[in-house]
Amino acid sequence: MNESQYSRNIREQLDDLSKQGLRVISVQESASEAERRKIAELYLAADVFVMNSRIESYPRVILEAMEFGLAIISTPCFGVKEQLVDKESGLFYDEGDIEKLHDHLRLLCNKPEERRRLGLAARKRLSSLNSYDQMLEAYEALYERILAAHQANS
């Protein structure tokens, strides 16, 4: 579990939301097939997906949330900006901006039609993105072209 001050602040805010009656489930990375099945069940039961990372690289969890048609709230960290479009297929808030996160959560809790709209838009956007494996293949092809050009010039 991440023990940074930022992570502790987020957990405290989530605890406060839970005390106000909002059901919040926080999940760490899964290691086993049984845990992954439970994660899929949580995606199916969820109304909103929130990611509060500061540093990422095309996070798979965003792709998973998009596949499940969830409304997504996230920091616009690396990769996420390429996956989601703010206010179209997700909602962004800046790292540490708890008030904006609160506003987004309140909006999605109070407006089920906005949750549905964002979830459908996220799922539609997913179909236009490279899959994780396609992205890795594209990087590999790029590296091979760079190496071939370097060898040709040597």
Image: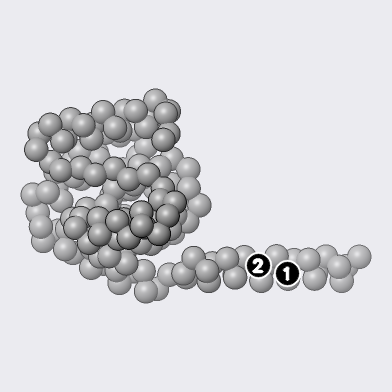
**Are the residues tagged 1 and 2 within 8 Å (C-beta)?**
yes
On the image, the x and y values in percent for residue 26 come to 29, 43
State the SS at label 2. Answer: helix
On the image, the x and y values in percent for residue 122 come to 29, 64
Q: In which quadrant is the C terminus drawn? A: bottom right
Residue 41 visible (yes or no): yes
In this view, 76 is above or below 4: below
At 37% across and 37% down in the image, what residue appears?
95
State the SS at label 1. Answer: helix
At 32% across and 67% down in the image, what residue appears?
67
Q: Which mark is residue 140?
A: 2
Q: Which residue is mark 1?
A: 144
On the image, the x and y values in percent for residue 20 come to 10, 34
Crowding at label 1, few (<14), some or many (≥20) Cα neighbours within 10 Å? few
At 43% across and 40% down in the image, what residue appears?
54
In this view, 60 is above or below 94: below
Dot 2 amino acid type: Glu
Q: Considering depth in this image, is 63 or 26 the residue closer to the camera?
A: 26
> In the figure, is residue 128 to the left or right of 139?
left
- Colour scheme employed for the rendering of this structure: one colour
On the image, the x and y values in percent for residue 93 come to 31, 43
At 42% across and 29% down in the image, what residue appears?
3
Dot 1 amino acid type: Glu
Residue 80 visible (yes or no): no
Report which quarter residue 84 is drawn in.
bottom left
